[in-house]
Amino acid sequence: MAVETRYVEVLLPLKLKDALTYRLPEGWSASIGDWVQVPLRGHLALGVVLRVSDRAPAGVSLSAIAEVAARVEKPPVSGEELAFWHAVADYYLCTPGEVFKAAYNAGLQRAMLQPEAPARRKKRASKKQEELAPGASSAVADEMRADAPAFEMKPLSEAQGAALERIRGGFAAGKPVLLAGVTGSGKTEIYLHLAAEQLRQGRDVLYLVPEIAVSKQLQQRIADVFGDRLLVFHSQTTVPQRYRVIDTLRRDPTPRIVLGTRSAVFLPLRNPGLIVIDEEHDRSYKQDDMAPRYNGRDAALMLAARRGASVLLGSATPSCEALYNVQTRKFVRVALPERFHGGEDPKVELIDTTRERRLGNMQGSFSRKLLKEMAAVLEAGQQVLVFRSRRAYAPVVQCEACGEPVRCPHCNVTLSYHKFNNTLSCHYCGYHRSFTMRCPSCGEVALAERGAGTEKLEEELQDAFPGRTVARFDADTTERKTVQEKLIRDFAAGRIDILVGTQMISKGFDFAKLALVVVVSADSLFAVPDFRSDERAFQLITQLMGRSGRRGAQGRIVIQTAQPDHPVLQRLLRAGQPGASSAGMLEERRQFAYPPYVRMISVTVKDRYEGRVWNVCRLVKEAADAVGIADIAGPITPAVDVVAGEHIAQFWVKLPRSRGLAAVKRAFADRLEQIERDFKGQTGIIVDVDPL
Ligand code: ADP
Ligand code: ZN
């Protein structure tokens, strides 16, 4: 006798701990993965059927169970996807609903509810038939294989060919491969060759890049080879574009290469054969502003393991995590040390600013010697890139009468002065007001700016090089995507002589006439109180170095610093091979028991009332004790301990790297959730696994 499905458990894209049970209307049937609309708190919500049952859940009164409101006629979510959502939720200590939301944000949820265009409906019908005939889709794959296009590609160099063979060897041994190669060594070309192989075999390729690096340059280069086999999915593509990518993958069995940022890891790939994770060290793979606080790189590794796909991680500056995995033989490392177009390693020079200042050799933020070298580069028709980690005109404005700096009324941090719009603004909460010279503390008209951000440097350079075009690339000037693209185009075309910018300029751009990179102050990179700050400073400066001297010329980087003996700078002076001198950095992590030698979880407590923060902190500590977590540091007040009116305290939990910890992690997270509920959501407790 057939069992009648009467009840469904529905997963909703929310922070709910469990799926919710609904009743199916008379005569309806449902399967796992089906899309439905269900009533929730007076609204209709989009959900996915997680389980079906002929019985109501025990202990729930039947009248309390609401009815499914509508079916959403879209191709179902596969069991593999649902299992992956659960695995990600387990690892990152969030709910499957939150992962569902990462896969389908509010915009995509709305798009799912749009009725289908008639043309699409027809396709759906034929898809149904295909499902009826078992093996039909593998027949389609066979067909694809038979008429797979040749894909026009550049032949690989000898070094690239050798690297490719070693990568295949790693894949054959079932291991992810770390391709360590300087910028311009030809990594991308290798990715494309491997991708073509996969597509020819009827398998999909996921090509992940960090948030900012999705350049038109790269997109075009992939499209040139793969044409309409390429699908693009990232935060700058529109919701309809992203929806179309999902819909295409669900309906059309043609093998695809998908270029995307971290959330592309949740796309419904049919048969992933290869995942490329370019710039694997990049911080923007980590989502840290909301749950799931996942790292796209690590989620991709999980996905690949579940789906039997190979993984190729690429970087000129591999992360400590990747190097550790090489050391422990979890990854295979393949090096590509030479630039494709040849050319010597970039030249690194340090300028000791303490000494230069003492000798009276500084002119504003720059040493006179450096300004002379910049002049020579410009004279030769070449370009200069100037890096400074802080935007704004001045990071601090201080009263010359009473000495007080001007602070944000909502955060424990100074306001930055932006000259272009004459405002003081908070880079933490967004508070801003127009600037006047009057001190808010003592009332004197005596405010003066301190320090130099990118805007001030732009002004200084304009003064030092009249007649040259100076432009600025930071969050203030690139708010609009079109402006950002124009600045890049103009610099690439030589219409800008000097480009001043923040971190944003270090990513993936290729400027042929860029001959000199300047780091105005390396010290601000070292001053960050974080065990990763040295790793980051090294990666950032190396990436900046990679912007210059492409196409065969020798690149040059000049670094101003008050700490010329700093280990990071000394290592840069020695740098030849990427990763070659990383042993010291890893050793330090081991000695002090930092990741990747341990697993770290941060717990952040936030509340408008400071007293309640400390009360909750006490409970967090008790929860750790109760589940047997021994190594918990805190509560610690972070450098900026009040943001947007909320007081902040933090804990750092260290766990040994063993697989048996899932239960401890989960028990801890459950207790924290309970504390949050006890305080009725007035106190926020944020759990971040593998924080960056
Ligand atoms: P990476 O990804 O390591 O930065 P790319 O793959 O972008 O390096 O290669 C650097 C430059 O060399 C690019 O301009 C690219 O077009 C060129 N290049 C790389 N491999 C080849 C090849 N096999 N044949 C011709 N040009 C190549
Ligand atoms: Zn603020």
Image (cartoon, rainbow, N blue to C red):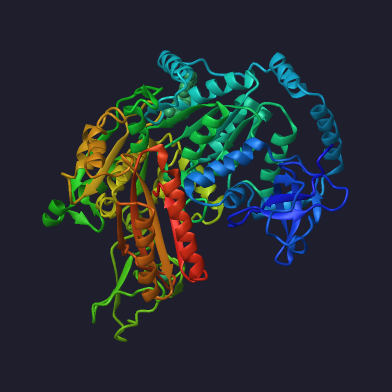
Residue 403 or 210: which is nearer the viewer? 210
Residue 566 vs 633, above or below: the answer is above
Residue 232 vs 413, above or below: the answer is above
Which of the four quarters of the rendered structure image does ligand 2 lie in? Answer: bottom left
Residue 224 found in image quarter: top right
Q: Position of residue 27 (x, y in %)?
A: 88, 48
Residue at the bottom extreme? 443
Q: Position of residue 33 (x, y in %)?
A: 71, 42
Residue 320 or 232: which is nearer the viewer? 320
Residue 365 vs 684, above or below: the answer is above
Name the side, left or right, on which 500 lies relative to 98: left
**What residue is rendered at 34% in x and 65% in y?**
640
Residue 104 vs 446, above or below: the answer is above
Residue 524 visible? The answer is yes
**What residue is rendered at 21% in x and 32% in y?**
574
**What residue is rendered at 30% in x and 51% in y?**
631
Name the side, left or right, on which 454 lies relative to 199: left
Residue 426 visible? The answer is no
Residue 219 or 191: which is nearer the viewer? 191
Q: How many marks?
A: 0
Residue 441 found in image quarter: bottom left
Residue 59 or 455: which is nearer the viewer? 59
